[in-house]
Amino acid sequence: ASSASTMPQFFGIEIPKGQTKKFAADEGDSIVLCQAALGLKPKAGERVTVFLQSGDSPELAIGSLTMGTCDQFSLGTGLTFSSGETVSVRHNGSAAVCLTGRIEDDFNDLDDSEDDEDGDFQYLDDEDDDDDEE
């Protein structure tokens, strides 16, 4: 096993009532959103819709939360945003909403010569790992 291999890291962001929060992956990383959940003290029965916008794309609803009925929802295998994409998230609720997921290295798409100095990646076993990675 390679000591330079990197595990995905936790990503989380809290979107307070009435605010839009923005985030973007660092160079060479992707952010994968996996779940949305109601924050502290949501109003009973209030339906909270979570909206997301990436770059110049139109804003879209990614799901709705209702305390006691749907306190959290999963985004399947996740919504992936690459470095260079700025993502804006907001909601229409009276309490905070938390989004969680993971940060992954974008090592699959990099040319070996581009980031040799990075130190986060090791390319020695590229040919041998084709069946292990998928």
Image (cartoon, rainbow, N blue to C red):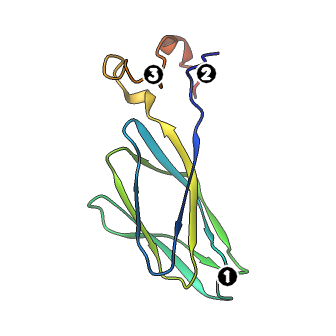
Q: What element carries label 1?
A: loop
- Tell me where residue 97 appears, x and y as whole percent: 57, 72
Give the quadrant of the C terminus. Answer: top right
**Residue holding disc 1:** 41
Q: Do the residues labelled 3 and 1 touch (CB within 8 Å)?
A: no
Side of 57 where 132 appears, left or right: right
| Image x and y of residue 19, in percent | 43, 76
Which is in the foreground here, disc 3 or disc 2? 3
The image shows residue 37 at horizontal and vertical percentages of 63, 68
Give yes or no for contact between labels 3 and 2 (Cβ–Cβ under 8 Å): no
- Within 10 Å of disc 1 (Cα), the crowding (few <14, some 14-19, many 20+) is few
The residues bearing labels 3 and 2 have C-alpha atoms spaced at a distance of 22 Å
Secondary structure, mark 3, is loop
Looking at the picture, which amino acid does disc 3 mark? Gly
Above or below: residue 116 compared with residue 72: above
Q: Is the residue marked by circle 3 packed among few (<14), some (14-19), or many (20+) residues within 10 Å?
A: few
Q: Position of residue 39 (x, y in %)?
A: 63, 73
Q: Residue 132 carries which label?
A: 2
Q: Which of 79 and 131 is in front in this view?
A: 79
The 10 Å Cα crowd at callout 2, few under 14, some 14 to 19, many 20 or more, is few
Task: Report the residue at 58% width, 81% height from top.
Answer: 95
Tags 2 and 1 in contact by the CB under 8 Å rule? no
Q: Distance between the residues labelled 3 and 1?
A: 44 Å
Say which quarter of the image contains residue 117. Answer: top left
Q: Which amino acid does label 1 sit on?
A: Lys
The residue positioned 52% from the left and 44% from the top of the image is 103
Q: Circle 2 — which element? A: loop
Q: Going from the N terminus, do you reach mark 3 or mark 1 first? A: 1
| Label of residue 119 in the image | 3
Q: Is 46 placed left or right of 105 in the picture?
A: right
Residue shown at the point (49%, 17%) measured from the top left: 122
Q: Count all numbered tags in the image, as a single digit.
A: 3
